[in-house]
Image (spheres, rainbow, N blue to C red):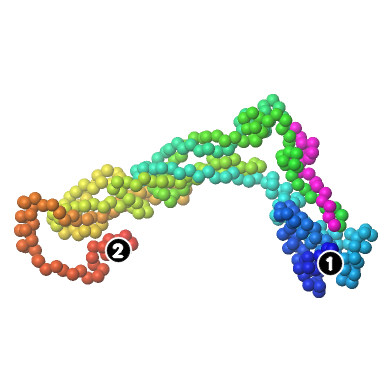
Amino acid sequence: MPRDYYEVLGVGRSADGDAIKKAYRRLAKQYHPDTNKDDGAADKFREATEAYQILNDPDMRARYDRYGHAGVQQAQAGGFGGAGFGDFTEIIEEMFSGFGGFGASGRRSRRSPRPGRDIPYTMNLTFEESIFGVEKEIEINRLEVCDVCSGSGAEPGTQPRTCVECNGSGEIRRVRQMFLGNMVEVVPCPRCSGSGKIIDTPCHECKGATQVRRNRKLKVKVPGGVDDSTRIRVSQEGEPGENGGPNGNVQIFFKVQPHEFFRRRENDIILDLRINVAQAALGAAIQVPTVDGEEPLSIPAGTQSGKVFTLRGHGAPKIRSDGTSISRGDELVVVQVVIPHKLTNEQKQLFEELGRTLGAEPEPQKVGKGFFDRVMEFFSGEG
Ligand SMILES: [Zn+2]
Ligand SMILES: [Zn+2]
């Protein structure tokens, strides 16, 4: 005994035409065998279609309401004349345009050009290379059009022949038996897998696949100023596109090795520098390492720990969005005054002499004026 048609569509007995149409559209979308491969989906689709055919036709619906399934079976046997059929195909077409695999739009999406996949590559750089830029050769593995058969898939000297099943179109029309007659649907040709061609003697290199994996070397110019967050794209060197679509890109990510002394903060380079008490107290002219070599730095008398000196233009270049480098950041020298913890007898004596001339009272610091406050202030950009 078939299920009640209203129950199948999940609508009430007083549902109007629109509600019935809407309910059927939802079920058809859910259970259409082209999109739903579950066991029983096809049966559910057929059941919903049958219910819709009856309830969408006022005459048949009246008969069903009055006599139940028996009332409409009689009409079916008598060659139900196609009332509402146009409406039905319209719904199916409307439904499946838009999500591929059925009808004209499905064909388009299968054969439309699609760009190839991107290939990611992580490049290791020394700190100096990241600052000044470098040209490096990298090796990637990608699919390429087979050069033995030029992408035909057939052994050189032979030709693929046109598939007789589909006459080279790559698709066949299949008639599906529906409740109210036949429905024609278009599916990829099973014989040639939709290519339209049969290869009798596959190319020995690609085994008929038309593409092969190759290792390729690429020269990559890395601009100065990159860091671990920079990504560089090498255009169209990725996997091949489909149906004439463009190749994908190679996306280069960077891993910069930490430096012994320097670290990056955006475009600035930070150097922690220890000076001794005498240099801090008396001032000193010293040489400071930068990525460009030693640079003179004048430490004024009375320099405190946490003081930051700026060496303009000795930082990392800024990278513009077009990949070129422009003006450089600065080197920030953060000074730490070192208190010696091992003194010779002579130094000890000198400190004792010094100590007698300095005040002996410890001096509490107001909140916000200490060493850490100064460093934090500077690095939060307020200094
Ligand atoms: Zn080949
Ligand atoms: Zn075919």
Point out the tag, 2 or 1, that comes first from the N-terminus.
1
User: Residue 204's x, y, as percent?
Assistant: 64, 28
Is 381 on the left-hand or right-hand side of 216? left
Which amino acid does the dot numbered 1 rest on? Leu
User: Residue 176's x, y, as percent?
Assistant: 82, 51
Front label number (2 vs 1): 1
Quarter where residue 81 is shown: bottom right
Few, some or many residues within 10 Å of mark 1 (<14, 14–19, 20+): many
- Quarter occupied by the C terminus: bottom left
- Asked whether residue 167 is drawn in magenta, I would say yes
Residue at the spot of label 2: 377
Range covered by the magenta-colored residues: 161-179
Which amino acid does the dot numbered 2 rest on? Glu
Residue at the spot of label 1: 55
For residue 94, say whether it is visible. no
* SS label for mark 1: helix
- Asked whether residue 162 is drawn in magenta, I would say yes
Few, some or many residues within 10 Å of mark 2 (<14, 14–19, 20+): few
* SS label for mark 2: helix
Is 21 on the left-hand or right-hand side of 304? right
Q: Which residue is situated farthest in the top direction here? A: 157
Tag of residue 307: none
